[in-house]
Image: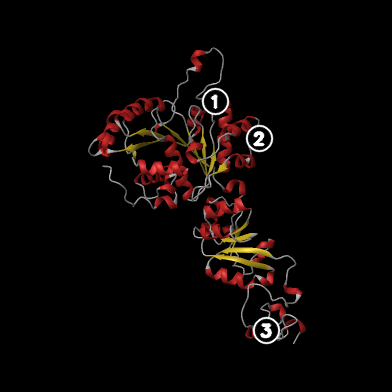
Amino acid sequence: MPSWCASSRRRGSSRAARVAPSRCSCPAAGWPASCRRRPTATCSPWCPPVCRSGAEVKVALALPLDDERRLTASAGFHGHEVVAVCSGGDELAVRIAQVPVELAVVAATPEHLTPRLVESADLLGVRMLVVADDATARRHAERTGIIDAVDGPADWALLGGGAPAVAAAPAAPDDAALPPVPISTARRPGVVLAVWGPHGAPGRTSIAIGLAAEFAAAGLRVVLADADTHAAAVAPALGLLDEAPGFAAACRLAGIGGLDETQFERLAQPHRASRHPFRVLTGIGRPSRWPELGEERVAGVLAAARACCDVLVVDLGASLERDEELAADVVTARRNAAALEVLRHADRVVAVAAGDPVGIARFLRSHAELGELVEPDRIEIVVNKVRASAIGLNPGGQLRQTLARFGGIEDAVLVPWDPAAFDAAVLSGRAIADAAPRSAARAGIRELATRLVPTPAAAGVRGRRGRRLA
């Protein structure tokens, strides 16, 4: 028997107690499988140097059960230490903050790769090795912001850039082979959504925050931007600091051509209070700073956002007038240039109306003005704060009939008025999806999100029942 794997060892100098035999589970030790007492994740201290690495890597796993067992059993042979094994991505997001983890090996499935895990790994500086077994898994990885997923199955050889130790599949015929798709073209440009509404506080900011939270919960990379040049409110609503407005800083960098992906992510601060985090470009704290949001700068920010995120939700002010063009003979800055530029470039425009007689009258007048700037097929109507106390019996039916008769608007989304849920969201600095997930108002916002950007996660909410409005 080799001296490095003796049948018994003594511990301490004063006690002569014998310890149980310790057999190395590493195949390099030369022991047959039948003589192993218990497979371990790491090599025995008396394991020969051939099976040990000079620097162990502390690894956490979030993989299917078969892959998890296989990698755990062979971790020690490859010089790694498995410090956490989790059955899901959200569980691993909590564990990596509790144990020292250098690398997380994650399967690219909705169960294991979640937006919460990606955000936690980014904040804690934990490297991730995302393994995609098929095209569906790779698409899910791209939706969560991972564009460098490796081909599966999971194997320790992937850490060194090698291929998994599996039998090679039969080669496809030459005529069936497809050229690889470059990374730069594999990802679609992001969608820009503008949230606008007339004067009178119809709930533009609440709807914008709610939409951002719903898209983030669906696994999309979301940025919420506040481009209101009159009364920016996103930052205080989410409990964020706005001394250094992120949207204004992004506009300045875009004006000099310096807004790249690195700078964009630096300026868009994450909202960590949400269960599914998203990033926020805060608005200007003082209305007098509106000249910083020029139309060319805003267009540059929108172009950069399309390359950096899946969905950009922009909260706009109510004013759409262009009086500066009539009051001056020379080209001058326009206070509403930011709103007009966003409306011009947005893929979809969410027009928010308040569900009361005054709010509907204001909306119908302003909707005609909006129609001069935006094509009707890009506009999605949502009526917020719908309640019988302001409309009467059957408020949903009356609102739909009024919009169809006086505005030619069909199939508007109705969001019930739930003051307790919205107050809880403002008090905690979170979206209504986190503060009151069972709220009827949240169900209406989810329906709106599904119409704007259909996703597999959002498609399942159509069958859920909410408060009856019609």
Quadrant containing the C terminus in the rendered view = top left
Residue beneath disc 1: 290
Labelled disc at residue 19: 3
Label 3 to label 2: alpha-carbon separation: 65 Å
Q: In the image, is residue 132 above or below residue 2? A: above
Can you name the residue that lies furthest to the left here?
A: 393
Identity of the residue drawn at 71% across and 78% down: 28
Q: Is residue 290 left or right of residue 373?
A: right
Identity of the residue drawn at 60% across and 42% down: 265
Identity of the residue drawn at 54% across and 27% down: 286
The amino acid type, in three-letter code, at marker 2 is Gly
First in sequence, mark 1 or 3: give its number: 3
- Dot 1 surroundings within 10 Å: few (below 14), some, or many (20 or more)? many
Judged from the image, the secondary structure of the residue bearing numbered disc 2 is loop
Q: Is residue 358 left or right of residue 125?
A: left
Q: In the image, is residue 37 above or below residue 270? A: below
Q: Position of residue 267 (x, y in %)?
A: 60, 39
Labelled disc at residue 258: 2
Can you name the residue that lies furthest to the top here?
A: 329
Can you name the residue that lies furthest to the front here?
A: 14
Q: Position of residue 132 (x, y in %)?
A: 56, 60
